[in-house]
Amino acid sequence: MSETKKGHPPALYLLFFTEMWERFSYYGMRGILILYLTKQWVEGGLAIDEKDASLIYGFFTGFVYFTPLIGGWLADNFIGQRKAITIGGITMMLGQFVLFAINTHVGLYIGLFLLIIGNGFFKPNISTLVGRLYPNNDPRRDSAFSIFYMGINLGAFLAPLVIGLFAENLFAVKDETGAIITYGYRYGFLISGIGMLLGQVLFNALASKYLGELGTKPAHLENSSEEEKEASNRPITKEEKQRMTVIFILTAFVVFFWAGFEQAGSSLSLYTDKFIDRTVGGFEIPTSWFQAVNPLFIVALAPLFAIFWTSNLGKKFSTPVKMGLGMVLLGIGFFFMLGAVAERGGENPDVTVKASLMWLVLTYLIHTIGELALSPVGLSVVTKLAPVKFASLMMGVWLLSSFLANIIGGFVAAFVESMGAFAIFASIAGFVIFLGLVMIALKGPILKMMHGVR
């Protein structure tokens, strides 16, 4: 595996494009999932009540982030990261094809189950491989994860546009006036499955060339020297235990970031469908296309963050401060949704009034800046703090935050109709800002437990 001191190894870009196609598959499906669940049978949906659909969405997106704990452990101890990525990719591809082929509640649950299992194998191991491309304390690692994160979001940007075009336009059945009678959601799942197939072909064709033997064996068998094998097999030290404890502490905070952030696919998506004026120049923007706004901002801003974190000023920001600021920014973003609610009349909205599109765009912009301050930094710090033999398992612990967050987020979305959008958005904003400030205040004790990792 070639590597330079200043640049990044070519393997980073292989992992970049592999993850891009996987995220294309996942976010394409996710962009239409809540709509597929709630639209009537005649409209190409499953006619599930919005409250129940929000809970199904929350539990699905939650368990997608629970199974990486198991997939990480299996890779660390038995199969290695490369096999895990391939098993996961093929399983997710099959899940998408089931959603395409079987448009019933049974097909829904089988398809979602396969996606959950497949993601458990794929997600923690590809992120761990990115970290393993660099030596310990290599200053390029945060920058590498920002680049990798751009790959994630390039796929997430393209997916809703392509899948939305297929589901809400090309394969939609329209009447003589152009109004949609039936949506082509099943074809959106088909395109998502094809995207997953492309990613796996790319990865398996080029992995040996660019990754060499990295990730082919369980971590404890893959060390190149006897000294490294001995270090990997010895009991973990007090310092390593404290570093692992920090991963759990950061995970506990981040749960609430993602619970708010993941409203994008549920309550914000339903609010956009009903109450946001989506018409621009006579064209009504498909609801699913708004799932591309956040990744568009990430693709645009991630290179700036990659540069900033390696600058003299950026190096002064420690991990707890970066992540705390990310939570504060998430809360600020919800203030713009309060503006949208206020434009429609506040807690007693005028049903004939739709809010300006700019409120939603500004919400996504601030949320994106918060995400870039928190998520790639978190992925990077987990690879720095985790002992080698627990690397994928600890990545699974980190992803566990999204498991809990999405389930919490599903319950939150389910209560929007009964509590009102203003109360929900205001509550999320206040709570995450408070937690972000707490994390920043605790930076001293946290950094002490990190033993030199920043």
Image: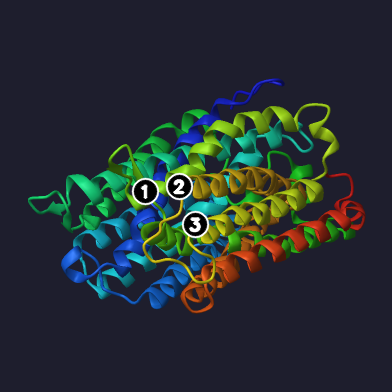
Q: Tag 2: residue type?
A: Leu
Q: Nearer the viewer, residue 349 or 194?
A: 349
Sequence-wise first label, 1 or 3: 3
Q: Kindly check if marks 1 and 2 are in contact, taking CB atoms under 8 A apart as contact.
A: yes
Q: Nearer the viewer, residue 76 or 295?
A: 295
The residue that mark 2 highlights is: 357
The residue that mark 3 highlights is: 264
Sequence-wise first label, 1 or 2: 1
* Residue 181 left/right relative to 427: left
Residue 405, visible in the rendered structure: yes
Instruction: Mark 3: give few (<14), some (14-19) or many (20+) Cα within 10 Å.
Output: many
Q: Kindly check if marks 2 and 3 are in contact, taking CB atoms under 8 A apart as contact.
A: no
Please tell me whether residue 249 is drawn above or below residue 2 in the rendered image: below
Q: Tag 1: residue type?
A: Arg
Q: In the rendered picture of this protein, how many numbered marks are placed on residues?
A: 3
Instruction: Mark 2: give few (<14), some (14-19) or many (20+) Cα within 10 Å.
Output: some
